[in-house]
Structure formats: structure tokens, C-alpha cells
Amino acid sequence: MSTSRQQCDGGPINYRQRLITHGEKLLRRLEGLLETHSLVGNAPFIDPQHFPWISHLEANGQTIATELDHILQYQDELPNFQDLSPDQYHLTQDNRWKTFFFYAFGVKAAQNCDRCPQTSQMLAAIPGMKTAFFSILLPHKHIPEHCGVYKGVVRYHLALKVPQPATQCRLRVGDQIRHWQQGQGLVFDDRFPHEVWNDSDEVRVVLIVDVVRPLKLPVSILNQTIIRLISWSPFVQDAKKLQTQWEQRLETMMTSR
């Protein structure tokens, strides 16, 4: 039975890729609905005042930066972005984009959260938080134009390490360019084409947080359901397995020093 099906399809059946492909088509069809029911507009950059939790996070930026400094002692051992998300290998292939994940679509990286307890506690208190991680760009790293997975979340960057002058690092979303300011944040819709540059000789670090997009009822309920389905998808579950492996490897390296 399986042989005949493979012959009819012209080769082995890649169920994982088919599931991801069909899922992406569904998400694209929903985008118009999310746009018309958005409570925060649909511009590339979004007014941070829509999110009251941002002021608390920025007020505690130094606490987060202190825990980050401990993690950066093991910078070379941290996973590259593509190590946790092989589907994004076309986006980056070198070792100059390091990551330290706390959450991914609601899936918790428990050991990483334990290593940064105060940061983790603040992240857990953010309403609608789904993904959070330190994004560490090494000198002269460029992330080419790309789009986020789903318009049902919006993205926040808290600048923790910004090389000076700040113009050496920049974020383009759509046709707008912004520069990070130390201790301050940016909110944007990562479904717009965007890219990032670190043209400096230093490391740039931001805390990335994805939160549920504020939407009118009943679309907000549908959105929560879609996000839950994404968390169960191979895209996230495979990354979770890889993250667990990296956590164990990092734990071994930390304890051996």
C-alpha cells in the first residue's frame, strides 16, 4: 500500500512539510480578518502605549541586563537561530545570530527560565505573552528581509545592548527604519517585510517578546485558538526538542566551568 502511494506521488510523502504548507495557507487567509478587527491598527510600527506592561519592563531593564550579562559569558555556546529552527536556514547560516529562548508560542524553556529568574518572572506576568528570547547579533551581522509567522501576534524589542553610535544598528519594517535606544523598546508588526543590521564592531542584544494582538470579539477568540494550534505544530514541537537538547548541553558546559 505505502509503495503504491509513493509511486503515485512521485516519491516519499513528506507529511511534515505538507502540514506546514497547508497551515501557512490557512494563516494567510486569516490575515484580512485580523486586519479589519485589529485594535492597534495595521501600521508597520505600533504605539507602545497600547501595552501598559511595557513601562514596567523598561523600568526593570537593568535587572534584565544583569541576568543577560551572566548568559553572555557563554555566548559561544549559545544556539544559533537556525539550530533551533532549521526551517529558517535560508535566513541565516553562520554563527553570528545567537539566541536564548524563554518561551516559543507558549512552550516554556524551563531551564533557561531558571537561569534568569527575575526576567522570567517579569515575562510570565505579561498579558498575552507567547514568545520571548534574547536575540544576540554579533558584529557585522545582517538578517535579510523576511516576514513573521502569524499576524495574530505583535512583536516588542527591548534594547539591552546597543553599540554606539546607535545609527550603526537599525531595523527596517516595511518602508520605515528605526534605531534602538538603550533601555527603550519598539513595537512592530513582523508580518511586514523586515530586516536587521548590526554594522558595528560590538554585540547588539534585544529582548524580543511576542504578545497576542488585541482584537475585537469574536475574532480574538478565534485568534487564541489559532495560536494554540501553532504551538502544537511540527514547526514549534521540533524546535522544542532542539531547544531541550541545547539546554542540556549548555547546562553541562556551565557546570563544568
Image (tube, rainbow, N blue to C red):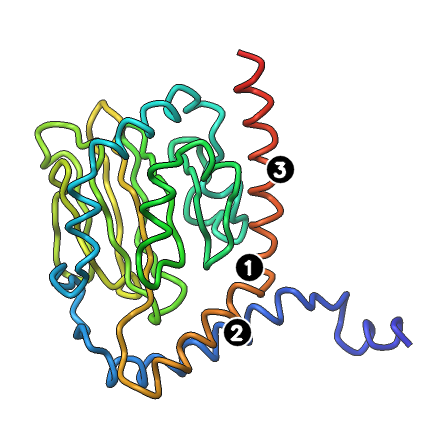
Query: Who is closer to the viewer here, 162 or 87?
Result: 162
Asked which secondary structure carries label 1, the reply is: helix
Q: Which residue extends farthest bottom?
A: 218
Q: Quadrant of residue 184?
A: top left
Mark 1 surroundings within 10 Å by alpha-carbon count, few (fewer than 14), some (14 through 19), many (20 or more): some
The amino acid type of the residue labelled 3 equals: Gln
In the rendered view, does 77 fall on the left or right side of 194? right
In the rendered view, does 188 fall on the left or right side of 5? left
Asked which secondary structure carries label 3, the reply is: helix
> Residue at 56% of width from left, 68% of height from top?
20
Q: Which mark is residue 235?
A: 1
Mark 2 and mark 3: Cα distance apart in space: 26 Å
Q: Which mark is residue 23?
A: 2
Asked which secondary structure carries label 2, the reply is: helix
> Residue at 42% of width from left, 74% of height from top?
224
Reading the image, the residue beneath label 3 is 245
In the rendered view, does 188 fall on the left or right side of 89? left
Mark 3 and mark 1: Cα distance apart in space: 16 Å
Q: Position of residue 256 (x, y in %)?
A: 58, 13
Q: Quadrant of the N terminus?
A: bottom right
Which badge, 2 or 3, is on the more N-terminal residue?
2
Query: Who is closer to the viewer here, 140 or 134?
Result: 134
Q: Position of residue 46 (x, y in %)?
A: 15, 63
Which badge, 3 or 1, is on the more N-terminal residue?
1
The amino acid type of the residue labelled 1 equals: Phe
Q: Are marks 2 and 1 in contact (CB under 8 Å)?
A: yes
The amino acid type of the residue labelled 2 equals: Gly
